[in-house]
Image: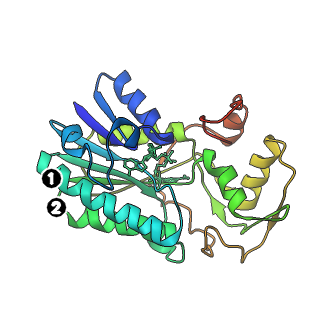
Amino acid sequence: MKLVIIGGTGLIGSKLVSKLREYGHEAVAAAPDTGVNTLTGEGLAEALRGAAVVVDVSNSPSFEEKAVMSFFTTSTQNLLSFAAEAGVGHYVALSVVGTGRIPDSPYLRAKNAQEALIKSAGLPYTIVHATQFFEFVKRIADEATEGTTVRLPPVLIQPMAAEDVAKAVGRIAVGPPINGTVEVAGPQQFRFDELIRQGLGARHDSREVVADSHARYFGAELGERSLIPANDARLGEIRFQDWLGQPMPLSGGAPQR
Ligand SMILES: NC(=O)c1ccc[n+]([C@@H]2O[C@H](COP(=O)([O-])OP(=O)(O)OC[C@H]3O[C@@H](n4cnc5c(N)ncnc54)[C@H](OP(=O)(O)O)[C@@H]3O)[C@@H](O)[C@H]2O)c1
């Protein structure tokens, strides 16, 4: 089966392409580096020719309010129209648990707009809602840092390894479209401040992490369960402590933790 992975050179995309190829599928990594640009449409018609499935795991280079909205709406509109033209039978997109209930977050508003376009396009689709990736811990901390203090609300979070995200998306991509949303999450729940404290501690980052119920997460105040999936979420296997024990990359390119 031919599957085109939009963002196939990124954190999730590169793992997904490898896994699909291991199972004997023709997985095409589509990204600006391979000559495919969803913002301009460049290379999309060629990449999608003969594809049964398109999986969108691309991401906006900027999280700034206007830029991120423009990225997800423009790229999704282009992708949907090229996919329809190519007769793609399953449109899969990776999004975030809680997109619909955290409207203060510009990033999640843009993901919501992406989802709305997919739902109204008339193509068979599956939206995958994942929780925060372990690989995202440092970026979360950086965003929440003032001086040497990281402020985060002590709400529940159920993060997962990028490896488990790619596995879940791969299984969904080779299955039938459900024309709805599937939630995937990690095997354990944490308090948000505690997760980030453990993550920074493991990399000998001396910043102090403080629990503050009004601290914002990428612009949004969170409720106790804003980031938590429903009870029927599919759970990954990799535990945070085991993931932290893996060797750290020595230099750029590889995922940061
Ligand atoms: N981070 C989290 O905790 C989290 C949680 C749940 C869901 N998600 C979702 O997971 C998805 C993937 O995230 P990620 O961390 O794997 O992203 P990533 O590592 O930043 O990779 C993004 C990919 O998108 C490609 N891309 C950027 N602009 C493009 C364009 N105009 N046309 C085609 N491809 C383009 C990039 O190519 P270049 O590198 O060449 O620019 C790269 O291959 C995102 O949609 C995000 O919303 C993230």
Between disc 2 and disc 1, whose residue precedes?
A: 1
SS at circle 2? loop
Closer to the camera in the image, 149 or 246? 149
| Colour approach in the figure | rainbow
Task: Name the quadrant containing residue 228.
Answer: bottom right
Q: Which residue is mark 1?
A: 84
Left or right of 168, for residue 115: left
- Decide: is 207 above or below 144: above
Q: Residues within 10 Å of mark 1 (few under 14, many from 20)?
A: some
Instruction: Evaluate whether residue 99 shows in this view.
Output: no
* x and y, in percent, of residue 23 in the image: 34, 23
Check the picture and name the quadrant holding the C terminus: top right
Q: Nearer the viewer, residue 7 or 66?
A: 66
C-alpha separation, residue under disc 2 versus residue under disc 1: 9 Å
Q: Which residue lies at the image location 71% right of the left edge and 32% below the top edge?
A: 248
Left or right of residue 188: residue 233:
left
Inspect the image, locate mark 2, and give the three-letter code of the amino acid beneath it. Answer: Gly
Q: Badge 2: how crowded within 10 Å, few (<14), some, or many (20+)?
A: few
Which residue lies under the disc numbered 2? 122
Residue at 52% in and 36% down: 163
The x, y position of residue 122, in whole percent, is 16, 61
Amino acid carrying label 1: it is Ala
* Tag 2–tag 1 contact (CB < 8 Å): yes
Horizontal side, residue 139 vs residue 116: left or right: right
